[in-house]
Each structure stands twice: as C-alpha cells, then as structure tokens.
Image (tube, rainbow, N blue to C red):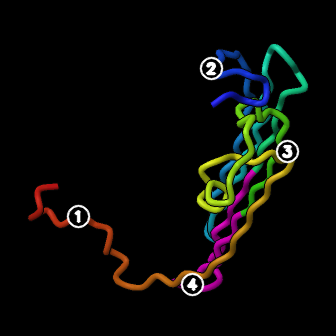
Amino acid sequence: MPTLFDRTSETLFYERLSATLALKDEWGSASGTVEAAHYFHDFNKNHVYSYGDANIRLFKGFSLRLYAQAQLIGDQLYLAKAGASEQEILLQRTQLATQFSYYGSAGLSYTFGSIYNNVVNPRFGQ
C-alpha cells in the first residue's frame, strides 16, 4: 500500500538521543525517560517521546503506581495514502495522522505473604 509520499518501501537513516533516570529507595521507586529523534534527510521529520513511572509505598504492602507518557510526533512517513476504514481504525490496524499523543494511568496494589516468598526452594533444583 503506497504511503502519502507514493512510496511502497524506503530506507532512511535517523539518529536518536535518549536519557533515562531511575531511582529506588525506601519510599518506592521512580523512573523517567526522554527521547528525541530525527531523520537525516529532513530535520523537520522528528519526534520527542517522554515517559515516567513511580511506585510509591504508602504503608507496608500497599503501594500507589503512577504512569504517564507523552509524544510530539512529526515523522509519520509511513501513513497510508488511502483513507482508513472505520473497522481498521477501531481495530487499530491503521495508523492515523497526529501531532500529539498522551497516556496516563494510576493504580493501587497490595502485596502480602512471607518476606521469604521470593526465595527459591533448593529442592526444586534452582
């Protein structure tokens, strides 16, 4: 299926820069990543992607989990020239043109059991 640029295949070079930070302490853990990339043939074809998550211990066994991601998108060279049908959109089989994407979630978890529950029983042979 041809793309918006009337191509059925193409080889392009790009570069990507990524930075990640991860923290772990008694209060829980947190991490985050920022990534930027662009194609060499056109510096305007680029994207910036960022995400972060945190797992915060509220009290013994009970934690709050947070996750967020965001993208600035300017490099969708692979979009199909023909329009997408409603079924393709609902089943997410076709990518739609966009300049921004975001997602977030939050959850609670409770862990219980022995402090030794992750120790391997030597009778199982590792």
Of 85 and 25, which appears nearest the observer?
85
Q: Residue at x 51, y 84 (%)?
A: 110
Instruction: Indicate the secondary structure of the residue bearing disc 1.
Output: loop
**Residue type at the position of mark 3:** Leu
Dot 4: within a 10 Å radius of its alpha carbon, few (fewer than 14), some, or many (20 or more) residues?
few
Q: Residue at x 68, y 61 (%)?
A: 53
Foreground label between 3 and 4: 3
Residue 66 counted in the magenta span: yes
Q: Please report contact status of discs 3 and 4: CB closer than 8 Å, yes or no.
A: no
Of 114 and 74, which appears nearest the observer?
74
Q: Residue at x 68, y 53 (%)?
A: 85
Q: Quadrant of residue 121?
A: bottom left
Dot 1: within a 10 Å radius of its alpha carbon, few (fewer than 14), some, or many (20 or more) residues?
few
**Residue type at the position of mark 4:** Phe
Q: Estimate the spatial distance between the alpha carbons at disc 2 and disc 4, rounded to whole Å.
A: 50 Å
**Residue type at the position of mark 2:** Ser
Dot 3: within a 10 Å radius of its alpha carbon, few (fewer than 14), some, or many (20 or more) residues?
some
Q: Residue at x 82, y 14 (%)?
A: 41
First reached walking from the N terminus: tag 2 or tag 4: 2
Instruction: Tell me the residue that label 2 is attached to.
Output: 9
First reached walking from the N terminus: tag 2 or tag 1: 2
Instruction: Indicate the secondary structure of the residue bearing disc 4.
Output: strand
Foreground label between 1 and 3: 3
First reached walking from the N terminus: tag 1 or tag 4: 4
Instruction: Tell me the residue that label 3 is attached to.
Output: 72
- Residue 74 percent coordinates (x, y): 85, 36
Q: Estimate the spatial distance between the alpha carbons at disc 2 and disc 1, rounded to whole Å.
A: 50 Å
Instruction: Tell me the residue that label 4 is attached to.
Output: 62
Q: Quadrant of residue 13?
A: top right
Q: Estimate the spatial distance between the alpha carbons at disc 1 and disc 3, rounded to whole Å.
A: 45 Å
Per the rendered image, the range of residues in magenta is 51-67
First reached walking from the N terminus: tag 1 or tag 3: 3
